[in-house]
Image (spheres, grey):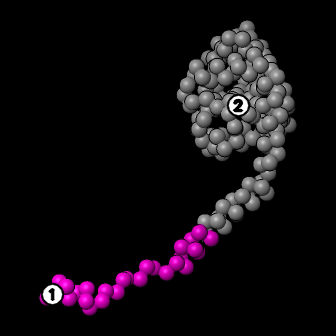
């Protein structure tokens, strides 16, 4: 099983996981420590990739692991899904807008190292499930074109404007007029 990892957060040996492709984007100061920990494994530390090199890394992977809980939009997750590979990511940030837990990937509680490792083991041990999740992810990614995203945004803005216009057209409630007889009962 080949796993593409975008950050070294939570990165450590996981029993039963081999042939790991590690794509490190942040905290490169930890690279020597990680290389030492993974000595004797089939791990490849690629460093920063872009363009065709990044596309080849996605194409070579069976699972995409993105453990960082601070992703605001989730572009890397969409890239992985567009490549047809399932995603393992924390249930936080923009990632939750793209990953449907158990359908196109697995979400785990942020900062929960045990749940993270369990999710990786699950897909490593169930390659058929991983492939099916990858197919579902690809379908979902195809629906996330910029034109569709912007059309949805414009529709959301239109709904808010429409709601505001409806509220603005409402007439304020008129005060109830009280008859003279109403006051007379108090001043007799």
**Residue placed at 54% from the left, 28% from the top?**
111
Residue beneath disc 1: 187
Q: Dot 1 lies on which element?
A: loop
Q: Residue furthest bottom?
A: 180
**Residue placed at 79% from the left, 43% from the top?**
141
**Residue placed at 61% from the left, 32% from the top?**
90
Q: Quadrant of the C terminus?
A: bottom left
Give coordinates of residue 162: x percent, y percent: 62, 71
Give coordinates of residue 85: x percent, y percent: 80, 31
Q: Nearer the viewer, residue 53 or 58?
A: 58
Q: Quadrant of the N terminus?
A: top right
Range covered by the magenta-colored residues: 162-188
Quadrant in the rendering for residue 69: top right
**Is residue 187 covered in magenta?**
yes
Q: Is residue 162 visible?
A: yes
Is the residue 128 above or below the residue 168 in the image? Answer: above
**Is residue 95 covered in magenta?**
no
In this rendering, would 168 be left or right of 47? left
Residue beneath disc 2: 102
Give coordinates of residue 2: x percent, y percent: 79, 21
Is the residue 118 above or below the residue 59 in the image? Answer: above
Q: Residue furthest left?
A: 188
Is the residue 141 above or below the residue 61 in the image? Answer: below
Quadrant in the rendering for residue 132: top right
Give coordinates of residue 35: x percent, y percent: 68, 16
Q: Earlier in the sequence, mark 2 or mark 1?
A: 2
Which label lies toward us, 2 or 1? 1
Q: How many numbered marks are there?
A: 2
């Amino acid at each position: 099983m080949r796993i593409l990892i975008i950050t070294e957060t939570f990165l450590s040996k996981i029993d039963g996981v081999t042939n790991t492709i590690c794509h490190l984007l942040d905290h490169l100061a930890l690279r020597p420590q990680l290389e030492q920990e993974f000595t004797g494994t089939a791990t490849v530390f690629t460093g920063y990739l872009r363009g065709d090199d990044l596309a080849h890394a996605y194409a070579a992977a069976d699972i995409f692991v993105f453990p960082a809980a601070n992703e605001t939009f989730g572009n890397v997750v969409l890239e992985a899904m567009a490549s047809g590979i399932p995603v393992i990511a924390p249930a936080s940030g923009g990632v939750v807008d793209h990953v449907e837990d158990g359908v196109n990937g697995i979400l785990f509680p942020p900062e929960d190292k045990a749940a993270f490792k369990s999710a990786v083991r699950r897909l490593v041990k169930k390659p058929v499930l991983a492939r099916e999740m990858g197919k579902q992810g690809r379908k979902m990614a195809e629906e996330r074109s910029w034109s569709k995203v912007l059309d949805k945004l414009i529709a959301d803005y239109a709904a808010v404007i429409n709601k505001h216009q409806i509220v603005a057209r409402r007439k304020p409630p008129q005060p109830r007029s009280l008859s003279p007889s109403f006051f007379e009962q108090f001043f007799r």
